[in-house]
Image: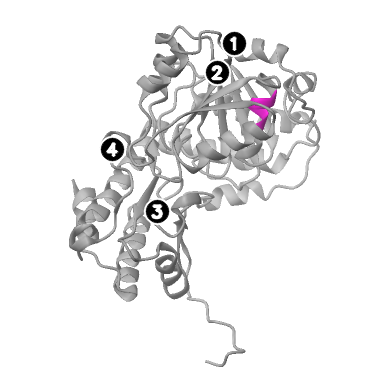
Amino acid sequence: MSATQPARKPRGRQFFANPGPTNIPDSVLLAGAHQTVDFNDPNFIEVYTACIDGLKRVLKTTQNIFLYTGSGHAAWEACLVNLLSPGDTVLIVESGYFSESWAKMAGDLGLEVQTVAADWRRGADPAAVQAALAADRDHRVKAVCVVHNETATGMTLPVQEIRAAIDAAGHPALLLADTISSLGSLDFRMDEWGVDASVGGSQKGLMLHTGMSFNGVSAKAMEAHKASRLPKHYFNWTNMLARPHKSFVGTVPVSFFYALQESLRLIEQEEGLENVFARHHRLAGAVRAAVQHWSGNNGPQLFCLNPARYSDSVTAILMPEGFNADDLRGVALKRFNVSLGGGLGPLGGKVFRIGHLGDLNEPMILGTLSTVELAMRVAGVPHAPGGVDAAIAALAE
Protein backbone atom coordinates (compact mmCIF):
# COMPACT_ATOMS: atom_id res chain seq x y z
CA MET A 1 0.00 0.00 0.00
CA SER A 2 1.28 3.47 -0.90
CA ALA A 3 2.10 5.86 1.91
CA THR A 4 -0.44 8.27 0.40
CA GLN A 5 -3.27 5.73 0.34
CA PRO A 6 -5.71 5.82 3.24
CA ALA A 7 -5.88 2.70 5.36
CA ARG A 8 -8.75 0.43 4.38
CA LYS A 9 -11.51 0.13 6.94
CA PRO A 10 -12.75 -3.34 7.85
CA ARG A 11 -16.13 -4.18 6.34
CA GLY A 12 -19.25 -5.10 8.27
CA ARG A 13 -20.94 -3.46 11.18
CA GLN A 14 -18.63 -2.38 13.98
CA PHE A 15 -18.87 -4.28 17.24
CA PHE A 16 -19.03 -1.41 19.72
CA ALA A 17 -17.94 -2.70 23.12
CA ASN A 18 -17.18 0.58 24.87
CA PRO A 19 -18.72 1.21 28.29
CA GLY A 20 -20.38 4.40 27.11
CA PRO A 21 -21.73 5.79 24.98
CA THR A 22 -23.43 2.51 24.20
CA ASN A 23 -25.29 0.91 21.33
CA ILE A 24 -28.61 2.59 20.53
CA PRO A 25 -31.49 0.30 19.49
CA ASP A 26 -32.81 0.95 15.99
CA SER A 27 -36.30 1.69 17.31
CA VAL A 28 -34.84 4.35 19.65
CA LEU A 29 -32.90 5.91 16.77
CA LEU A 30 -36.05 6.05 14.69
CA ALA A 31 -38.13 7.48 17.53
CA GLY A 32 -35.57 10.25 18.01
CA ALA A 33 -35.77 11.18 14.33
CA HIS A 34 -38.98 13.06 15.09
CA GLN A 35 -40.13 16.21 13.40
CA THR A 36 -39.58 19.42 15.31
CA VAL A 37 -42.43 20.32 17.62
CA ASP A 38 -43.14 23.14 20.03
CA PHE A 39 -41.95 22.02 23.44
CA ASN A 40 -45.05 23.68 24.94
CA ASP A 41 -47.41 21.76 22.67
CA PRO A 42 -49.90 19.75 24.78
CA ASN A 43 -49.16 16.58 22.78
CA PHE A 44 -45.46 16.89 23.58
CA ILE A 45 -46.18 17.67 27.24
CA GLU A 46 -47.91 14.27 27.46
CA VAL A 47 -44.76 12.56 26.15
CA TYR A 48 -42.55 14.66 28.42
CA THR A 49 -44.60 13.91 31.53
CA ALA A 50 -44.65 10.18 30.77
CA CYS A 51 -40.85 10.21 30.41
CA ILE A 52 -40.38 11.97 33.76
CA ASP A 53 -42.62 9.35 35.40
CA GLY A 54 -40.61 6.58 33.70
CA LEU A 55 -37.28 8.01 34.86
CA LYS A 56 -38.62 8.07 38.41
CA ARG A 57 -39.54 4.39 38.13
CA VAL A 58 -36.06 3.47 36.90
CA LEU A 59 -34.44 5.56 39.66
CA LYS A 60 -36.98 4.05 42.09
CA THR A 61 -37.92 7.43 43.49
CA THR A 62 -41.09 9.44 43.96
CA GLN A 63 -39.18 12.68 44.45
CA ASN A 64 -37.92 15.50 42.22
CA ILE A 65 -36.25 15.18 38.81
CA PHE A 66 -34.30 18.01 37.15
CA LEU A 67 -32.95 17.64 33.60
CA TYR A 68 -30.24 19.44 31.60
CA THR A 69 -28.86 19.56 28.10
CA GLY A 70 -25.38 18.23 28.84
CA SER A 71 -23.48 15.06 29.64
CA GLY A 72 -23.25 13.45 33.07
CA HIS A 73 -20.63 16.01 34.09
CA ALA A 74 -23.36 18.66 33.84
CA ALA A 75 -25.47 16.77 36.38
CA TRP A 76 -22.40 16.40 38.63
CA GLU A 77 -22.00 20.16 38.64
CA ALA A 78 -25.72 20.81 39.00
CA CYS A 79 -26.05 18.84 42.21
CA LEU A 80 -22.97 20.49 43.73
CA VAL A 81 -23.93 24.08 42.95
CA ASN A 82 -27.55 23.56 43.98
CA LEU A 83 -26.75 22.02 47.35
CA LEU A 84 -23.57 23.67 48.61
CA SER A 85 -21.97 27.00 49.44
CA PRO A 86 -18.41 28.33 49.04
CA GLY A 87 -16.06 26.73 51.56
CA ASP A 88 -18.32 23.77 52.31
CA THR A 89 -16.56 20.41 52.58
CA VAL A 90 -17.47 17.37 50.50
CA LEU A 91 -16.29 13.87 51.35
CA ILE A 92 -15.34 11.95 48.20
CA VAL A 93 -15.36 8.16 48.45
CA GLU A 94 -12.43 7.19 46.21
CA SER A 95 -13.28 4.63 43.54
CA GLY A 96 -11.16 5.52 40.51
CA TYR A 97 -10.87 8.04 37.71
CA PHE A 98 -14.43 9.34 37.98
CA SER A 99 -14.39 9.90 41.73
CA GLU A 100 -11.16 11.85 41.21
CA SER A 101 -12.80 13.89 38.45
CA TRP A 102 -15.80 14.72 40.64
CA ALA A 103 -13.38 15.78 43.40
CA LYS A 104 -11.49 18.07 41.01
CA MET A 105 -14.76 19.66 39.91
CA ALA A 106 -15.71 20.29 43.54
CA GLY A 107 -12.36 21.97 44.15
CA ASP A 108 -12.73 24.12 41.05
CA LEU A 109 -16.14 25.27 42.34
CA GLY A 110 -14.63 26.55 45.59
CA LEU A 111 -15.45 23.60 47.81
CA GLU A 112 -13.10 21.92 50.27
CA VAL A 113 -12.48 18.28 49.36
CA GLN A 114 -11.76 15.46 51.78
CA THR A 115 -11.17 11.98 50.39
CA VAL A 116 -11.75 8.53 51.83
CA ALA A 117 -8.82 6.77 50.18
CA ALA A 118 -9.25 3.34 48.65
CA ASP A 119 -7.37 0.72 46.66
CA TRP A 120 -8.77 1.03 43.11
CA ARG A 121 -8.69 -2.78 42.75
CA ARG A 122 -10.64 -3.52 45.94
CA GLY A 123 -12.82 -0.51 46.68
CA ALA A 124 -13.56 1.66 49.68
CA ASP A 125 -14.43 0.37 53.13
CA PRO A 126 -17.72 1.86 54.44
CA ALA A 127 -16.20 1.74 57.93
CA ALA A 128 -13.64 4.31 56.77
CA VAL A 129 -16.50 6.59 55.70
CA GLN A 130 -18.10 6.19 59.11
CA ALA A 131 -14.80 6.97 60.83
CA ALA A 132 -14.23 10.10 58.75
CA LEU A 133 -17.69 11.40 59.55
CA ALA A 134 -17.46 10.50 63.24
CA ALA A 135 -14.29 12.60 63.41
CA ASP A 136 -16.11 15.55 61.84
CA ARG A 137 -17.60 16.79 65.10
CA ASP A 138 -18.36 20.26 63.71
CA HIS A 139 -20.25 18.78 60.75
CA ARG A 140 -18.14 20.64 58.22
CA VAL A 141 -18.80 17.86 55.70
CA LYS A 142 -22.03 18.76 53.95
CA ALA A 143 -22.15 15.98 51.37
CA VAL A 144 -20.72 12.51 50.74
CA CYS A 145 -20.11 11.76 47.06
CA VAL A 146 -19.99 8.17 45.83
CA VAL A 147 -19.80 6.65 42.36
CA HIS A 148 -22.17 3.69 42.37
CA ASN A 149 -20.42 2.01 39.43
CA GLU A 150 -16.86 3.13 38.67
CA THR A 151 -16.57 2.84 34.90
CA ALA A 152 -12.78 3.11 34.92
CA THR A 153 -12.16 0.13 37.20
CA GLY A 154 -15.16 -2.12 36.61
CA MET A 155 -16.25 -1.95 40.24
CA THR A 156 -19.61 -1.38 41.93
CA LEU A 157 -19.77 0.21 45.38
CA PRO A 158 -22.59 -0.57 47.85
CA VAL A 159 -24.41 2.75 48.11
CA GLN A 160 -26.72 1.39 50.79
CA GLU A 161 -23.70 0.59 52.99
CA ILE A 162 -22.39 4.14 52.56
CA ARG A 163 -25.80 5.42 53.68
CA ALA A 164 -25.64 3.10 56.70
CA ALA A 165 -22.17 4.44 57.54
CA ILE A 166 -23.44 8.03 57.45
CA ASP A 167 -26.34 7.12 59.71
CA ALA A 168 -24.15 5.14 62.10
CA ALA A 169 -21.93 8.20 62.51
CA GLY A 170 -25.03 10.28 63.34
CA HIS A 171 -23.98 12.74 60.65
CA PRO A 172 -26.36 15.06 58.74
CA ALA A 173 -24.38 15.01 55.46
CA LEU A 174 -26.27 14.58 52.20
CA LEU A 175 -25.56 11.46 50.14
CA LEU A 176 -24.86 12.14 46.44
CA ALA A 177 -24.61 9.12 44.13
CA ASP A 178 -23.35 8.94 40.54
CA THR A 179 -25.51 6.38 38.68
CA ILE A 180 -24.24 7.23 35.20
CA SER A 181 -22.95 3.75 34.30
CA SER A 182 -25.35 1.84 36.54
CA LEU A 183 -28.83 3.27 35.98
CA GLY A 184 -30.93 1.01 33.79
CA SER A 185 -28.28 -1.72 34.00
CA LEU A 186 -27.87 -2.43 37.72
CA ASP A 187 -30.39 -2.16 40.50
CA PHE A 188 -30.46 1.34 41.99
CA ARG A 189 -32.96 2.34 44.68
CA MET A 190 -32.76 6.04 45.33
CA ASP A 191 -35.45 6.35 47.99
CA GLU A 192 -34.88 3.01 49.73
CA TRP A 193 -31.13 3.62 49.96
CA GLY A 194 -31.52 7.16 51.29
CA VAL A 195 -29.82 8.90 48.37
CA ASP A 196 -30.34 12.66 48.46
CA ALA A 197 -29.18 13.47 44.94
CA SER A 198 -28.55 11.00 42.15
CA VAL A 199 -26.67 11.79 38.94
CA GLY A 200 -27.71 10.16 35.67
CA GLY A 201 -26.99 10.45 31.96
CA SER A 202 -28.67 9.46 28.73
CA GLN A 203 -25.89 7.59 26.95
CA LYS A 204 -25.44 4.35 28.86
CA GLY A 205 -28.12 2.07 30.29
CA LEU A 206 -30.88 4.30 28.93
CA MET A 207 -29.54 3.62 25.41
CA LEU A 208 -29.79 7.19 24.08
CA HIS A 209 -27.45 9.66 22.44
CA THR A 210 -25.06 11.59 24.67
CA GLY A 211 -26.31 15.02 25.64
CA MET A 212 -28.99 14.85 28.32
CA SER A 213 -28.45 14.37 32.04
CA PHE A 214 -30.48 14.68 35.20
CA ASN A 215 -30.59 14.67 38.98
CA GLY A 216 -33.03 12.89 41.22
CA VAL A 217 -33.39 15.09 44.31
CA SER A 218 -34.80 14.24 47.75
CA ALA A 219 -36.95 16.47 49.94
CA LYS A 220 -33.99 16.84 52.34
CA ALA A 221 -31.81 18.01 49.46
CA MET A 222 -34.45 20.51 48.34
CA GLU A 223 -34.30 22.04 51.81
CA ALA A 224 -30.51 22.28 51.56
CA HIS A 225 -30.91 23.90 48.14
CA LYS A 226 -32.72 26.86 49.70
CA ALA A 227 -29.55 27.80 51.60
CA SER A 228 -26.98 27.07 48.85
CA ARG A 229 -24.85 30.02 47.77
CA LEU A 230 -22.65 28.67 44.99
CA PRO A 231 -23.24 30.66 41.76
CA LYS A 232 -25.71 29.06 39.34
CA HIS A 233 -28.14 30.08 36.67
CA TYR A 234 -28.74 27.47 33.98
CA PHE A 235 -28.53 24.71 36.61
CA ASN A 236 -30.59 26.57 39.23
CA TRP A 237 -33.42 24.34 40.46
CA THR A 238 -35.37 27.35 41.74
CA ASN A 239 -35.33 28.85 38.25
CA MET A 240 -36.45 25.51 36.83
CA LEU A 241 -39.35 25.12 39.24
CA ALA A 242 -40.77 28.40 37.93
CA ARG A 243 -40.95 26.99 34.39
CA PRO A 244 -43.77 24.80 33.04
CA HIS A 245 -41.44 21.82 32.50
CA LYS A 246 -39.82 22.14 35.96
CA SER A 247 -36.46 21.63 34.17
CA PHE A 248 -34.36 23.14 31.38
CA VAL A 249 -33.64 26.85 31.65
CA GLY A 250 -34.04 27.41 27.92
CA THR A 251 -35.08 25.19 25.03
CA VAL A 252 -36.20 21.65 25.82
CA PRO A 253 -34.43 19.03 23.59
CA VAL A 254 -37.67 17.50 22.33
CA SER A 255 -36.12 14.73 20.20
CA PHE A 256 -34.53 13.18 23.30
CA PHE A 257 -37.95 12.63 24.83
CA TYR A 258 -39.38 10.77 21.85
CA ALA A 259 -36.28 8.55 22.00
CA LEU A 260 -36.53 8.22 25.78
CA GLN A 261 -40.19 7.25 25.51
CA GLU A 262 -39.19 4.32 23.29
CA SER A 263 -36.20 3.40 25.48
CA LEU A 264 -38.44 3.25 28.54
CA ARG A 265 -40.90 1.10 26.61
CA LEU A 266 -38.13 -1.36 25.78
CA ILE A 267 -36.85 -1.41 29.36
CA GLU A 268 -40.13 -1.54 31.23
CA GLN A 269 -42.63 -3.21 28.90
CA GLU A 270 -40.77 -5.28 26.32
CA GLU A 271 -38.16 -6.72 28.69
CA GLY A 272 -38.99 -5.64 32.24
CA LEU A 273 -36.55 -3.79 34.50
CA GLU A 274 -35.69 -6.80 36.67
CA ASN A 275 -35.05 -8.87 33.53
CA VAL A 276 -32.74 -6.10 32.28
CA PHE A 277 -30.71 -6.46 35.46
CA ALA A 278 -30.63 -10.26 35.09
CA ARG A 279 -29.45 -9.99 31.47
CA HIS A 280 -26.63 -7.65 32.44
CA HIS A 281 -25.56 -10.01 35.22
CA ARG A 282 -25.60 -13.00 32.87
CA LEU A 283 -23.57 -11.28 30.14
CA ALA A 284 -21.12 -9.80 32.63
CA GLY A 285 -20.55 -13.26 34.09
CA ALA A 286 -19.62 -14.55 30.63
CA VAL A 287 -17.08 -11.76 30.16
CA ARG A 288 -15.54 -12.42 33.56
CA ALA A 289 -15.37 -16.16 32.86
CA ALA A 290 -13.43 -15.47 29.66
CA VAL A 291 -10.99 -13.10 31.34
CA GLN A 292 -10.41 -15.46 34.27
CA HIS A 293 -9.55 -18.19 31.77
CA TRP A 294 -7.26 -15.91 29.76
CA SER A 295 -5.35 -15.07 32.96
CA GLY A 296 -3.63 -18.45 32.72
CA ASN A 297 -0.18 -18.46 31.11
CA ASN A 298 0.45 -15.05 32.75
CA GLY A 299 -2.32 -13.51 30.67
CA PRO A 300 -4.62 -10.53 31.27
CA GLN A 301 -6.64 -10.53 34.47
CA LEU A 302 -9.64 -8.84 36.01
CA PHE A 303 -8.65 -5.46 37.39
CA CYS A 304 -11.21 -5.70 40.19
CA LEU A 305 -10.03 -8.09 42.89
CA ASN A 306 -13.19 -8.01 44.99
CA PRO A 307 -15.76 -10.51 43.63
CA ALA A 308 -18.51 -8.93 45.74
CA ARG A 309 -18.02 -5.71 43.78
CA TYR A 310 -17.68 -6.95 40.22
CA SER A 311 -19.53 -4.59 37.90
CA ASP A 312 -22.29 -5.98 35.70
CA SER A 313 -22.01 -3.10 33.24
CA VAL A 314 -18.26 -2.92 32.49
CA THR A 315 -15.21 -5.11 32.98
CA ALA A 316 -11.73 -3.58 33.25
CA ILE A 317 -8.95 -5.97 32.19
CA LEU A 318 -5.35 -5.54 33.34
CA MET A 319 -2.70 -6.34 30.73
CA PRO A 320 0.35 -8.50 31.47
CA GLU A 321 3.48 -6.63 32.44
CA GLY A 322 5.26 -5.26 29.38
CA PHE A 323 2.20 -5.21 27.09
CA ASN A 324 0.27 -2.08 26.19
CA ALA A 325 -3.52 -2.17 26.26
CA ASP A 326 -3.83 0.53 23.62
CA ASP A 327 -1.76 -1.52 21.18
CA LEU A 328 -4.18 -4.42 21.65
CA ARG A 329 -7.16 -2.10 21.22
CA GLY A 330 -5.60 -0.81 18.00
CA VAL A 331 -5.38 -4.32 16.56
CA ALA A 332 -8.99 -5.04 17.53
CA LEU A 333 -10.25 -1.84 15.94
CA LYS A 334 -8.12 -1.45 12.82
CA ARG A 335 -8.03 -5.09 11.76
CA PHE A 336 -11.29 -6.47 13.09
CA ASN A 337 -13.59 -3.45 13.65
CA VAL A 338 -14.19 -4.05 17.36
CA SER A 339 -14.12 -0.93 19.55
CA LEU A 340 -12.94 -1.51 23.13
CA GLY A 341 -12.69 1.00 25.97
CA GLY A 342 -9.29 2.30 27.02
CA GLY A 343 -7.74 2.88 30.42
CA LEU A 344 -8.40 6.26 32.05
CA GLY A 345 -5.98 8.42 34.01
CA PRO A 346 -3.18 6.36 35.61
CA LEU A 347 -4.66 3.20 34.04
CA GLY A 348 -3.99 4.47 30.51
CA GLY A 349 -2.21 1.76 28.50
CA LYS A 350 -2.51 -0.65 31.42
CA VAL A 351 -6.11 -1.77 31.08
CA PHE A 352 -8.71 -2.12 28.40
CA ARG A 353 -12.41 -2.24 29.12
CA ILE A 354 -15.31 -4.23 27.73
CA GLY A 355 -18.66 -2.53 28.16
CA HIS A 356 -21.59 -4.91 28.55
CA LEU A 357 -24.46 -2.56 29.20
CA GLY A 358 -27.44 -1.31 27.28
CA ASP A 359 -28.64 -2.90 24.06
CA LEU A 360 -26.68 -6.13 23.67
CA ASN A 361 -27.07 -9.89 23.76
CA GLU A 362 -25.11 -13.15 23.86
CA PRO A 363 -23.95 -13.14 20.20
CA MET A 364 -22.62 -9.61 20.57
CA ILE A 365 -20.71 -10.54 23.73
CA LEU A 366 -19.33 -13.74 22.22
CA GLY A 367 -18.32 -11.91 19.05
CA THR A 368 -16.45 -9.31 21.08
CA LEU A 369 -14.71 -11.92 23.24
CA SER A 370 -13.73 -13.98 20.18
CA THR A 371 -12.16 -10.94 18.59
CA VAL A 372 -10.32 -9.95 21.76
CA GLU A 373 -8.83 -13.45 21.88
CA LEU A 374 -7.95 -13.20 18.18
CA ALA A 375 -6.36 -9.79 18.72
CA MET A 376 -4.29 -11.13 21.62
CA ARG A 377 -2.98 -13.91 19.41
CA VAL A 378 -2.12 -11.46 16.61
CA ALA A 379 -0.47 -9.03 19.05
CA GLY A 380 1.48 -11.75 20.83
CA VAL A 381 -0.14 -11.10 24.20
CA PRO A 382 0.29 -14.13 26.51
CA HIS A 383 -2.97 -15.77 27.51
CA ALA A 384 -4.58 -19.16 27.98
CA PRO A 385 -6.56 -19.91 24.80
CA GLY A 386 -10.16 -20.97 25.24
CA GLY A 387 -11.62 -18.00 27.06
CA VAL A 388 -14.56 -17.93 24.65
CA ASP A 389 -15.36 -21.54 25.52
CA ALA A 390 -15.39 -20.53 29.18
CA ALA A 391 -17.84 -17.72 28.34
CA ILE A 392 -20.05 -20.15 26.42
CA ALA A 393 -20.06 -22.52 29.37
CA ALA A 394 -21.07 -19.68 31.70
CA LEU A 395 -23.93 -18.69 29.41
CA ALA A 396 -25.08 -22.28 28.96
CA GLU A 397 -25.57 -22.57 32.71
**Bounds of the magenta segment:** 77-81
Mark closer to the chain start, 2 or 1: 2
Above or below residue 209? Residue 84 is above
Secondary structure beneath label 4: loop
Mark closer to the chain start, 4 or 2: 2
Q: Please tell me whether mark 3 or mark 4 is closer to you in this view.
A: 4
For the residues marked 1 and 4, what is the alpha-carbon distance in whole angstroms? 33 Å
Question: In this image, 112 relative to 396: left or right?
Answer: right
Above or below residue 298? Residue 243 is above
Q: Please tell me whether mark 4 or mark 2 is closer to you in this view.
A: 4
Q: Amino acid at mark 2?
A: Asp
Q: Quadrant of residue 46?
A: top right
Q: Which residue is mark 3?
A: 354
Q: Which residue is mark 4?
A: 306
Mark closer to the chain start, 1 or 4: 1
Mark closer to the chain start, 3 or 4: 4
Nearer-the-camera pick, 289 or 176: 176
- Residue drawn at the location 69% of the way across and 31% of the way down: 109
For the residues marked 3 and 4, what is the alpha-carbon distance in whole angstroms? 18 Å
Whether pointer 3 and pointer 4 mark residues with C-beta atoms closer than 8 Å, the reply is no
Q: Which residue is mark 2?
A: 196
Q: Could you classify mark 2 by the number of other residues whose Cα lies within 10 Å: few (under 14), some (14-19), or many (20 or more)?
A: many
Q: Which residue is mark 1?
A: 220
Placement of the C terminus among the 4 image quadrants? top left
Task: Tell whether position 79 is magenta.
Answer: yes
For the residues marked 3 and 2, what is the alpha-carbon distance in whole angstroms? 31 Å
Q: Position of residue 146 (x, y in %)?
A: 48, 28
Secondary structure beneath label 3: strand
Mark closer to the chain start, 3 or 1: 1
* Magenta portion: prevailing SS class: helix
Q: Could you classify mark 4 by the number of other residues whose Cα lies within 10 Å: few (under 14), some (14-19), or many (20 or more)?
A: few
